Image: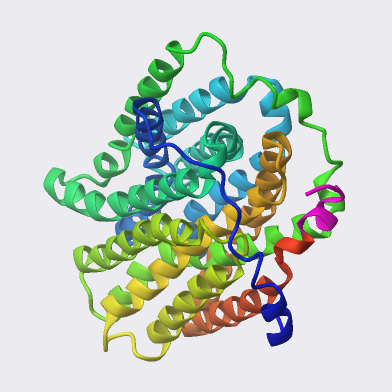
Amino acid sequence: MTPSSSRTAQPPVRAAQPAKAGLGWPDLVWLGVIVAIGINLRPLLTSISPLMATVRAATGLSFYGASLLTSLPVVVMGVGAFVAGALTRWPGQMRGIALGLLAIALACGARWVAGSGAALLLTAALAGVGVAAIQALLPGVLKQRFHARVPLAMGVFSASIMGGGGLGASLSPWIAKLSGNWHTALAMWALPALLAFTAWLALHRRTPTNTADAGSAAHVSAGGPMWRKRRAWALGVHFGLVNGGYTSLVAWLPAYYQQHGASIAQSGSLLAAMTVFQAAAALLLPLAAASFRDRRPWLVLGLSAQLVGVVGLTAWPLAAPLLWVACAGAGLGGTFSVTLVTALDHAEHPGVAARLAAFTQGVGFIIAAIAPIVAGLVRDATGTFTAAWIMLAVSISAMIALTGVFSPRSYARAMGVSGR
């Protein structure tokens, strides 16, 4: 974005916002249930990471095989996002989210008895199916239910996802030590999934007609196929390379610091600290951007923080590890939220916006799944993660450049609609 274009865009930068009433009790109940759901979408990844050395010793997995425990669910998340339209038609948004929570609960519970690498990979795939259904369907529900407060709703949802990741990283090593069994530390995450499932059903018992499903399925094909839109691909690549940083750090940050002499508990605490900053930024950055139609400055801010963190981890890993994971975490969390908000901004109709958000996640999570595999292969080949972190820094720099195309003036043209 050139200085001259920035000046000419100044008058409409601040979005014209409709009058908003305060949040009522129904809104707060909804947000509470959304938090309960979001908490379950990342422990299936982060609970394994601090215990990776123990799991590898027990199952005989290589670094490459162990990376699949993180990347396989993310691949499934991406593939699942592409069938969001079919999920909207059947089983519908309410039932689809409920079934997703049950899949997560079953997958985590099965880890109680999963003793081989193959069995753990099967649980990872099943959990990925559940997460894929929820992540594909819930943004459309939020766009419709909180139409005037999408940044708030997406911020709460994203923050709960990151917070759940932090809980997985911090509690799992402690439970493994307390119980003397890594299976227990992985299987316990079935319980919050069952609680969220119960809360989601209770929420919808109060509403006989599923308003989230109504109106979305009828417009599932509106706006034309997303794969033909360059903007959809640009958003997907942006989301994917941002989340490639997340999956790489979730998979290998503890192992990286264990190489530098940290204990399992200490390395898990660093990952947990990273997710605390992720959660805070996932909520606060979209709220800061809420009054501005142009989200690009906020995307650049988040990406820049992530870049600082990755460069610090690479060049001075022992100088200030908490500072580096704080920067990386804040950048990852904030950019995750604002990228999804930007995707939803592109279309007024909740059904079309949900399809774009689903396509963005589909492309993005498949790209993100590749990142920890590449990092694991690089680690096997070189004996260090340095080259992987350098590759990550280069990809973040590329995404800062790509952010410039997401001008709000281009939304209608990019989506092939008029009158925006």
Outermost top residue: 208
Q: Position of residue 160 (x, y in %)?
A: 38, 46
- Asked which quadrant contains residue 338, the reply is bottom right
> Can the viewer see residue 373?
yes
Q: Is residue 416 magenta?
A: yes
Residue at the image point whose x is 50% and y is 50% from the top: 151
Residue at the image point whose x is 73% and y is 28% from the top: 86
Is residue 140 placed above or below 60 in the rendered structure? above
Is residue 102 placed above or below 265 in the rendered structure? above
Q: Position of residue 403 (x, y in %)?
A: 66, 71
- 30 sits to left or right of 216: left
Q: Position of residue 349 (x, y in %)?
A: 71, 37
Is residue 374 placed above or below 108 in the rendered structure? below
- Asked which quadrant contains residue 315, the reply is bottom left
Bounds of the magenta segment:
411-420
Q: Quadrant of the N terminus?
A: bottom right
Q: Is residue 153 magenta?
A: no
- 288 sits to left or right of 367: left
Q: Name the foreground residue: 222 vs 121.
A: 222
